[in-house]
Image (cartoon, coloured by chain):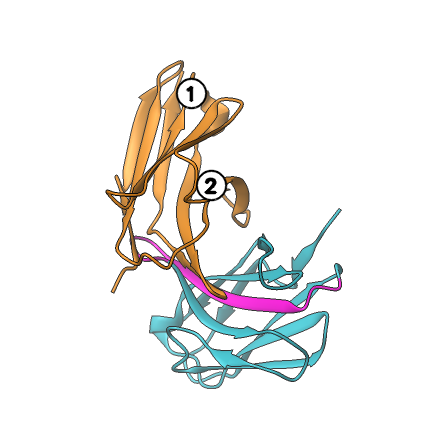
Chain colours: A cyan, B orange
Amino acid sequence: DVKVTQSSRYLVKRTGEKVFLECVQDMDHENMFWYRQDPGLGLRLIYFSYDVKMKEKGDIPEGYSVSREKKERFSLILESASTNQTSMYLCASRLRQGYGYTFGSGTRLTVV
Amino acid sequence: QQQVKQSPQSLIVQKGGISIINCAYENTAFDYFPWYQQFPGKGPALLIAIRPDVSEKKEGRFTISFNKSAKQFSLHIMDSQPGDSATYFCAARSGNQFYFGTGTSLTVIP
């Protein structure tokens, strides 16, 4: 069965910390995505990657960066965490354009 | 700016009733309209999807109705069950990008 694994279900970090959210897929998918999910705002695209070493900004990239050194792993980095980055973060992948998404279970990040 | 507008934000339905969630869009370049179901503590999972060349798609108790001229599509859950209680997201695809609605929290009460 296809799997997208996010390494942490819950994280609590302090303001100003550098935070790494990890996502791994075992399906040899080319495309990977990071979304944040907030009540009343739905899913908003932060960054995406269509291939290894490639990254593109989504709709709300400010305060975030990403890394994709290997095809199966896509990391979201909060350079200096702030309280307004408290959210649920969802990673997704798909085989390539034209295919549907598989989502991970999410990481609920709280910045205090 | 929300590309896909979803309503209602929350919905309570009696067991056996019909749940209806609506979405509207403006971008005529959208060519694929999926619905996702998300249970607490889980990521969204694809439930059912439709392309704009058909007006209805049914899978079991779940039906998408699509009105191209009105730029609206809706999810109907027939004979709603407590196990259907979840958050539902509509989405629309243009090129490489998916745009999601804001989600509807459905509660089905026994």
| Residue of label 1 | B80
Indicate which disc residue B70 carries: none
| Dot 2 or dot 1, earlier in sequence | 2
Identify the residue shown where x is 40% and y is 13%. Answer: B16
Numbered disc in front, either 2 or 1: 2
Is residue A69 left or right of B69 when viewed as pictured? right
Tell me the quadrant of the picture where the N terminus of chain B can be found: bottom left
Quickly name the residue at label 2.
B50
Residue B16 sits above or below residue B7 on the image: above
Report which quarter residue A59 is drawn in.
bottom left
Q: Image quadrant for the C terminus of chain B?
A: top left
Mark 2 to mark 1 CA distance (whole Å): 21 Å
The magenta stretch spans residue A41:
yes
Q: Give the quadrant of residue A61.
A: bottom left
User: Would residue A104 be seen by someone viewing this image from the given angle?
Assistant: no
As drawn, is B41 to the left or to the right of B14?
right
Q: Which subunit holds the residue at mark 2? A: B
Hey, which quadrant is residue B100 in on the image? bottom left
Residue at 54% in and 57% down: A106
Secondary structure at numbered mark 1:
loop
Residue range (magenta): A28-42
**Height in image: A68 above or below B2?**
below
| Element type where label 2 sits in the image | strand
The residue lying toward the viewer, choosing from A48 and B25, is B25
